[in-house]
Amino acid sequence: MNVGEYKVKKALNNNVVIAERDNQEVVVIGKGIGFARKNGDWLEQQDIEKLFVLKDEKEQQSYLKLLPHISQTMIDVTVEAIFLIGKKAGMDLNEHIHIGLLDHLSFAHARIAQGMAIENPFLAETKALYPREYAIAKEVVALVGQQTGVQLPEGEIGFIALHIHSAIQNKSMNIVNSHSQLVSHLVSLVESQFAIKLDKESMDYLRLVRHLRFTIERVMTGEKVEEPKTVAKLLKQEYPVCYNLSWKLIKVMQRTLGKPVYDAEAVYLTMHLQRVQNKSK
């Protein structure tokens, strides 16, 4: 093989080819690049529009199994969307986004085309937790609309934002989803305790949600925050309802995450809860 050139290993369809370069397999995208190609053929550089590497063999196998069930339009728009995400994020993405986003966009597109929209119960929390990913997801939805003529609803922006966050942070979608659902559950407990409905666009809501997110991240990494003992005593005396609620939320976190939460977290959480309670009066 000539260094820098690509040799066909398998043509998946007219526009997608598995090729090899310097003993590394790559997925190559190009209009008509797979037409009449056979194993051992060389690819012309000018025919290659996009390419990406799937180093993990399981990811590669999953991708190959998925492709025959996806329309060429959705393959093309997903590849374009992933390159857009990478450019906007300014970093390499975890390769699982190639499978996860392709599967999600294809399924969502089919559902919407058939008039079957699905509500996203975590939309407000996702928008507050991941504003950067949400903004990029909004562009992805616009791209899908332009390329396919089907406009995905706002709820899909939230789902796509989670895929983007997962790929940027190198986390599994299961973890990202479970943490988002936990934040949503904690917020609902706050609303129930205070008998209020939080304004999802308010700064207090955004601060609370982001604080919960960072608390969860600290718990998962074992990061310890210092406990201001004087302040803790004052908050316990002055704001017993908020202080007790903060411990209720912490116990839910401990049970859900399966990890201990440091006592100091109750102090900082009480401050946020007290602000929310004050604004609701």
Image: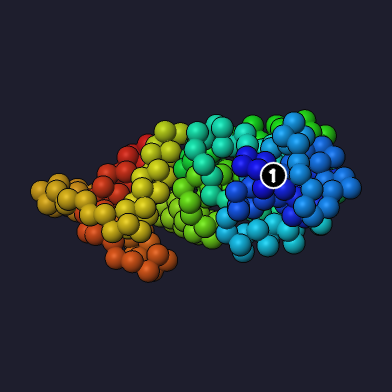
Which residue is the site of mark 1? 6
Residue ID at (68%, 62%): 61
Give the left or right position of residue 221, taking residue 192 as reference. Answer: left
Disc 1 element: strand
Q: From the viewer's perspective, is residue 249 above or below residue 280? A: below
Q: Nearer the viewer, residue 60 or 100?
A: 60
Residue ID at (56%, 32%): 87
Q: How many marks?
A: 1
Most extreme residue toward the left is 230
Most extreme residue toward the front is 2
Query: What residue type is disc 1 on?
Result: Tyr
Residue ID at (16%, 52%): 227
Answer few, some or many: residues within 10 Å of disc 1's Cα (few below 14, many 20 plus, some between 14 and 19): many
Expressed as whole percent of the image width and height from the top left, the position of residue 79 reads: 69, 41
Quadrant where the C terminus sits is top left
Colour treatment of the image = rainbow
Expressed as whole percent of the image width and height from the top left, the position of residue 148 reads: 81, 37
Q: From the viewer's perspective, is residue 189 above or below residue 153? A: below
Q: Is residue 257 visible?
A: yes
